[in-house]
Image (cartoon, grey):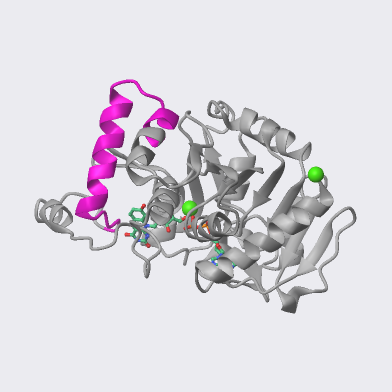
């Protein structure tokens, strides 16, 4: 079976690990979010692509859910000793190497999709990982604080401020000019089923859907989504702060309505959210907490079964 899945970071990566376990013989293409990307110390950092690559390649820090396992932070300490900013974003030494290789290749003229393929040659994630676009986009968040009303990079709001200041707007800078990366629309056209994993509906899935042509391509396919909201709360992280910013309730119902029909054909909700309804969408209730690979695989199997029935 040919499967396309969109993906953000932790939620996407853990789901994909389950999907691979559930269907090892399928050909899986992952369209990764690059709206979280940030340039730090001259280096191009792609947190969501790296989270998928490290998680599926066996290099992720399991507790944290991002960054490398057995990580050290000597470079970060040395940068801090020079007083170099920002000091609120923690890049580890092993992780630094990824950003150095990526930046070197980008500077040599390779597009991000080719760079990602080269990085994945080492990690062998078992999926084809394509960034949503080779064109640079960045998610910015409009806030009002002691320094007035201003836009900050998504990572500054998310990591430095822990989303404690309300977001007035969330904007994907560069969205108008960004085209899908090579292979994205073809993979969607060739897919038997498309999965929306339980990734952040605003700054992961919502970001990918803003790239011209992607939503339209998905609307022609059988798409099954997994709710990232369980019992009115994001299972981990602060997705509620992103949903509030765009005027959407933190419920499995509201996230389904945000994606809408005809995009979504099937929607998996947690058992406590079994009352969710939307015309044109088949809804099934399942345990949706990813405790480990087995529970993630059970969710993935349920999504595939529903997609196969609807296709
Ligand atoms: P990020 O880029 O690292 O924030 O990761 P994603 O965008 O891929 O996913 C983050 C979202 O995953 C969170 O907002 C949660 O709502 C969702 N999530 C995390 N763990 C689970 C889980 O075990 N089950 C479900 N259903 N959703 C989860
Ligand atoms: N998240 C944090 O909360 N603090 C960090 O210092 C941090 C560093 C970091 C470095 C590399 C990387 O790939 C991810 C990193 N993250 C960090 C996670 C990440 O920035 C966010 O959780 C996501 O971008 C939100 O979707
Ligand atoms: Ca992310
Ligand atoms: Ca559809």
Q: Main secondary structure of the magenta part?
A: helix
Asked if residue 176 is among those painted magenta in the image, a careful observer would answer no
Q: Which residues are magenta?
A: 88-116
Q: Residue furthest right?
A: 279
Question: Up-down: is 157 above or below 150?
Answer: below
Q: Between 147 and 26, which is closer to the camera in this rendering?
A: 26
Q: Quadrant of residue 212?
A: top right
Q: Residue furthest front?
A: 25
Position of 139 with respect to 253 (left or right) is left
Residue 45: % across, % down? 34, 43
The residue lying at 70 percent from left, 38 percent from top is 215
Q: Quadrant of ligand 2?
A: bottom left
Q: Quadrant of residue 194?
A: top right
Asked if residue 110 is among those painted magenta in the image, a careful observer would answer yes
Q: Residue furthest top?
A: 109
Question: Up-down: is 163 above or below 27?
Answer: below
* Residue 257 in view of the camera: no
The residue lying at 38 percent from left, 40 percent from top is 120
């Amino acid at each position: 079976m040919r499967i396309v899945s969109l993906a953000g970071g932790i939620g996407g990566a853990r789901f994909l690990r389950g999907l691979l376990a559930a269907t090892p013989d399928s050909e899986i293409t992952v369209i990764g979010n690059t709206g979280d990307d940030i340039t730090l110390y001259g280096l191009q950092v792609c947190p969501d692509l790296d989270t998928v690559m490290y998680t599926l390649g066996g290099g992720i820090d399991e507790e944290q859910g991002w960054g490398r396992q057995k990580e050290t932070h000597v470079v970060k300490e040395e940068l801090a000793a020079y007083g170099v900013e920002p000091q609120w974003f923690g890049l580890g030494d092993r992780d630094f190497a990824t950003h150095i290789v990526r930046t070197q290749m980008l500077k040599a003229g390779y597009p991000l999709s080719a760079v990602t393929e080269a990085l994945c040659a080492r990690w062998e994630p078992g999926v084809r990982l394509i960034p949503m676009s080779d064109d640079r986009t960045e998610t910015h968040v409009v806030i009002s604080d002691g320094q007035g009303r201003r836009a900050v990079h998504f990572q500054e709001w998310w990591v430095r401020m822990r989303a404690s200041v309300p977001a007035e707007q969330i904007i994907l800078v560069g969205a108008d000019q960004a085209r899908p990366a090579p292979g994205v629309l073809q993979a969607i056209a060739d897919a038997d089923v498309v999965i929306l994993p339980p990734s952040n509906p605003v700054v992961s899935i919502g970001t990918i859907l803003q790239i011209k042509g992607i939503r339209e391509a998905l609307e022609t396919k059988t798409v099954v989504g997994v709710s990232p909201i369980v019992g009115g709360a994001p299972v981990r992280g602060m997705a509620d702060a992103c949903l509030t910013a765009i005027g959407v309730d933190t419920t499995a119902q509201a996230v389904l309505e945000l994606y809408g029909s005809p995009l979504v054909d099937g929607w998996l909700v947690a058992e406590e959210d079994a009352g969710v309804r939307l015309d044109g969408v088949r809804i099934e209730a399942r345990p949706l907490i990813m405790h480990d690979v087995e529970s993630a695989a059970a969710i993935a199997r349920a999504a595939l079964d529903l997609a196969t029935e609807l296709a």
